[in-house]
Amino acid sequence: MNFNRILSVALAAVVGGGAAIAHADENVLNLYSSRHYQTDERLYSDFEKATGITINRIEGKGDALIQRIASEGANSPADVLLTVDAGRLWRADQQGLLQPVGSEALAAAIPANVRHPDGHWFGFSRRARILYYNPDKVSAADAPTTYEELADPKYKGLICIRSGSNIYSLSLMSHLIDKHGEEAAEEWAKAVVANFARDPQGGDTDQIRAVAAGECGISVGNTYYYARLAASDKAEDRAVAEKVVPVWPNQNEGGVHMNISGAGIAKNAPNRENAVKFLEYLASKQAQRYFSNGNNEYPVVVGALDNPVLEALGGFVVDPINVAVYGENQPLAQKIYDRAGWK
Ligand code: FE
């Protein structure tokens, strides 16, 4: 602990009084997390048992947590930021809120295309964004098999999709910019807007429900929303899943657009060593199973998949793009959506 740290901890102790969050402590980890799945309890308690480190969880929405770490500044108690979408981790990193981690264990376990090149953040689960269609509205022979085909005029009035400011939409656009260039990506966006069944609204589950109800014929969404409906204990949810056909896109052209849920160590982490231990733990096979199964996501560590719902969705080809691109192209992606009138 250097002098500045001692000073800041002493100040925090004076200013904070009996604050709920321990600032610097040998046996504590302050985890800022936008995850909230029940299976995570086991994930955390296993770590606590194995290490004797207590996890203090501060939960909130991803962007709100980033905002909070930024406003807490140098005295932030945050050790680890855990959130979804490489584009959002990139936002945190852009604000200088994360620090490099040179862990050989993490570099060995996690493929290079799903972590920051200098270890500012690491992917811990993968989330595939696929297509869905309603066979009453679009025949199997006519159904789209790529993201690019959503621009085909034959789908006029058939597409339900999320807003252009949504992080998943931004990451997909960032990917398409990388693949096809700005001009072609904008042409695509304009043509997809011309095919909208309605103005963008709602989340991924709302799109699937709209397709099932026949309000539109085609949508885009992450697989775990479909898996949640398909495995629901409510018959009406399962009926929604049965109404739609999931399609793995771009299987002969680059592969499916894959994003991550991931974490990085906060710039001013008071318990840095514990934070490194925690990230290394998250890359272990057992933790990978809890972590990915908690939301029906795919593990990043090869061979850790152990989920019958996902196994039923089958194998697939993944686009090997480095997910850091989703962040780098994000400002341009937003401009393109705006110019295309994709609200
Ligand atoms: Fe989601």
Image (cartoon, rainbow, N blue to C red):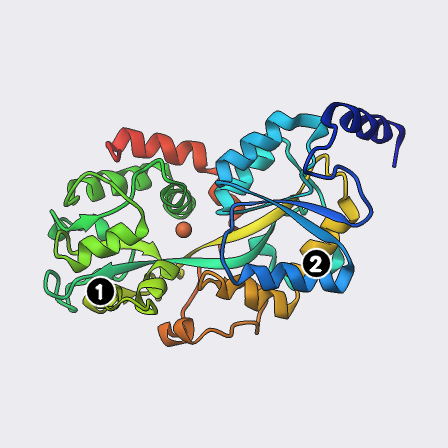
**Of labels 1 and 2, the one closer to you:** 1
Amino acid on which disc 2 is placed: Glu
Rendered position, 238 above or below 19? below
Where the N terminus falls, by quadrant?
top right
- Ligand 1 neighbours mark 2 (CB distance < 8 Å): no
Position of 73 with respect to 175 (left or right) is right
What amino acid does circle 1 point to?
Answer: Glu
Mark 2 — residue?
A: 280
Contact between marks 1 and 2 (CB within 8 A): the answer is no
Q: Is residue 223 left or right of residue 59?
A: left
Name the residue nearer the viewer: 247 or 187. Answer: 247
Rate crowding at label 1 as few (under 14), some (14 to 19) or many (20 or more) other CA atoms within 10 Å: few
**Residue in view at x 67 percent, y 38 percent:** 78
> x, y (%) of residue 295?
45, 60
Q: Quadrant of residue 331?
A: top left
**Residue 10 coordinates in the image, percent (x, y):** 83, 27
Task: Find disc 1 in the rendering and name its residue.
Answer: 236
Give the quarter of the figure containing the C terminus.
top left
The residue lying at 14 percent from left, 57 percent from top is: 213
SS at circle 2: helix
Measured as percent of width and height from the top left, residue 229 is found at 31, 63
**In the rendering, which numbered label is found on residue 246?**
none
- Relative to 185, does residue 304 appear above or below in the rendering? below
Distance between mark 1 and mark 2 Cα atoms: 40 Å
* Residue 38 image position (x, y, % from top left): 50, 60
Residue drawn at 76 percent across, 27 percent down: 12
